[in-house]
Amino acid sequence: MVDTQVLGQEMVIEALKDVYDPEIPVNVVDLGLVYTVEVADGDVHVEMTLTAPGCGMGDYIAQQAEWRIAEIDDVEDVQVDMVFDPPWTPDMITEDGKRLLGID
């Protein structure tokens, strides 16, 4: 059987689950840091944020996200932009993220 999986948002989101804020043991998806994922003709554009605008790890996290997305088959170009509107709040953490953090 031939694998007919096509590059899409779900693949990118799954890949981003391998990217962590080094100060928090939860991936960027479950922390609620990923705002948008757009995929078109092998090009991927991601808008994401940080838990705090002054976080010194922003460049590191964006680079890790870019590298991880670039590993996906059929990705031609990756752009990861850090945005701060809307500002991140703990309410954006997924249920899985809350469980990992011990937040009920």
Image (spheres, helix red, strand yellow):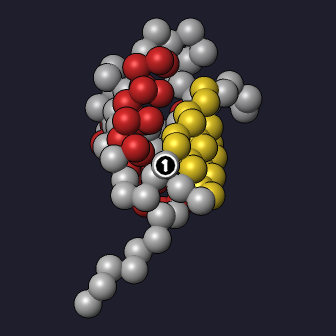
Residue toward you, 53 or 94: 53
Q: Position of residue 97 (x, y in %)?
A: 39, 44
Q: From this viewpoint, which residue is outermost toward the right? A: 85
In the structure shown, which secondary structural element does the residue marked by tag 1 occupy?
loop
Q: Position of residue 7 (x, y in %)?
A: 47, 64
Q: The N terminus is located in which quarter?
A: bottom left
83 left or right of 27 in image: right
The quarter of the displayed image where residue 60 is located:
top left
Q: Position of residue 104 (x, y in %)?
A: 41, 45
Q: Residue at x 32, y 79 (%)?
A: 3
Q: Is residue 37 visible?
A: yes
Dot 1 corresponds to which residue?
76
Q: Residue at x 55, y 34 (%)?
A: 80
49 left or right of 21 in image: right
- Determine whether 31 is above or below 73 in the image: above
Q: Amino acid at mark 1?
A: Glu
Q: Is residue 89 visible?
A: no
Q: Residues within 10 Å of mark 1 (few under 14, many from 20)?
A: some
Residue toward you, 68 or 32: 68
Q: How many marks?
A: 1
The quarter of the displayed image where residue 20 is located:
top left
Residue toward you, 90 or 3: 3
48 left or right of 21 in image: right
